[in-house]
Image (cartoon, rainbow, N blue to C red):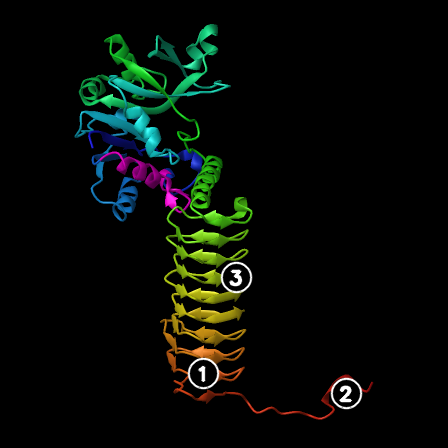
Amino acid sequence: MSISVVILAAGQGTRMKSTTPKVLHEISGKPMLFHAIDAAQKISDDITVVLYHQAERIQETIEAYYSGIHFHMQDSVQFPGTGGAMKGVTVKHSKALILNGDMPLVTMSALESLMQGDADINMSVIKLDNPTGYGRVVINQGNVVEIVEEKDCIPAQKEIQTVNAGVYCVKKELLERYIPHLNNDNAQKEYYLTDIIKMAVDEGKIVHPVMVDEEEFKGVNSKLDLAHAEEIMQRRIKTEWMKAGVSMRLPETIYIDSRATFEGECILENGVSIQGAAYIIASHIKTHSVIEDAHIENSDVGPMGRVRPHSTLIDTHIGNFVEVKKSTLTGVKAGHLSYMGDATIDAGTNIGAGVITCNYDGKNKYPTKIGKNVFVGSDTQLVAPVTIEDDVMIAAGSTINKNVAQGELAISRAPLRTVKNFFYKFFGDK
């Protein structure tokens, strides 16, 4: 890898109107900054993230998932702005690609297009049908000659449709020369990275415009932008998985986390939500079911099923309104209206309607272990910790708070008492 990457993530992001740093707002299960880091890691072994606002929180979040990332603290008081963010940054390789941490839709192929050629600076540009509000990039004989803010444009320049997309690939030696000479002689009193373009042009350096896709270089500055970016990311994720063989009914209604993985022939019905690093193999997830960080193999879930984190389902049927949490089910049938938490359940076992594991006493969680070929009758409460051995029958309506040995029937019911003609005594004669 012969290029360094610098990701600018120091801004306050006030338009997000949130106490969460802008770059940590999630898109398809990951902070938007992580999407930029993932793309950068595919092209570089030297990545620097520039921080300032809530720097400690952002750095801790990154370090929990990545190693080998360098960090630089912007002196935003003395040197605000994008140019100020680059003051003091050192890079390893002969070229540096400068990205923004709020561009989660950027791809490796888009970044590679900026790395090509021998220009002193490759500058990303977008062609807009309506460039109103943007600074224009003036191109002459194939090279950039000027960036003109709209308020400074003459009428002919206002007709220009090429605008700055905000990502640059710059030779290291130019950065080392130009960045120290940036000034804040402007209305905002900020140091602008775009000023290096003028410095390069004035020196006769080659600044090459690279036309990029507006969608990939879309910045996220508000909750509305975040929602739009999520829609685009979801469309990409689902398109790739459908190409890989996953069937989706009404895919626009389905949510798939960027960390999820599918294998074999899987079916996702409308309204399904696949969250976290779910791993789904040859399974059918039915309408409006939710899978969170779970392993589902050769099984079907739903409709209206929920499989929570740290659960494994193999050769299992989970029906409507069934919830599984931190449990391993192998060859199990649970048709409807049940909860299995902190449980291990073996092959051939049937869980009746309304069965729950009572796994929490208000302080601690306890395990339930159910063996093979167990029939658990409807409306049974399994009070953990409890072990049900193989070949057991549990009568409907039972509360099981002791272990049950192999082959036994367990039944726990209060005797039925009837009062003759009570209805008529209570409500009066017919």
Helix, strand or loop at label 2? It is helix
Disc 3 + disc 2, Cβ < 8 Å: no
Residue 130 point in image, percent of width and height: 51, 19
- Would residue 5 be found to the left or right of residue 306 on screen? left
The residue lying toward the viewer, choosing from 187 and 74, is 74
Residue at x-position 32% and y-position 29% = 111
The relative height of residue 143 versus residue 77 in the rendered view (above or below) is above
**Residue that badge 2 annotates:** 424
Q: Amino acid at mark 3?
A: Gly
Q: Tag count in the figure?
A: 3
**Residue that badge 1 annotates:** 400
**Residue that badge 3 annotates:** 302
Q: CA distance from mark 3 to mark 2?
A: 44 Å
State the quadrant of the N terminus: top left
Q: Quadrant of residue 45?
A: top left
- Would residue 163 be found to the left or right of residue 196 on screen? right
Instruction: Classify 10 Å Cα crowding around label 3: few (below 14), some (14-19), many (20 and above).
Output: many
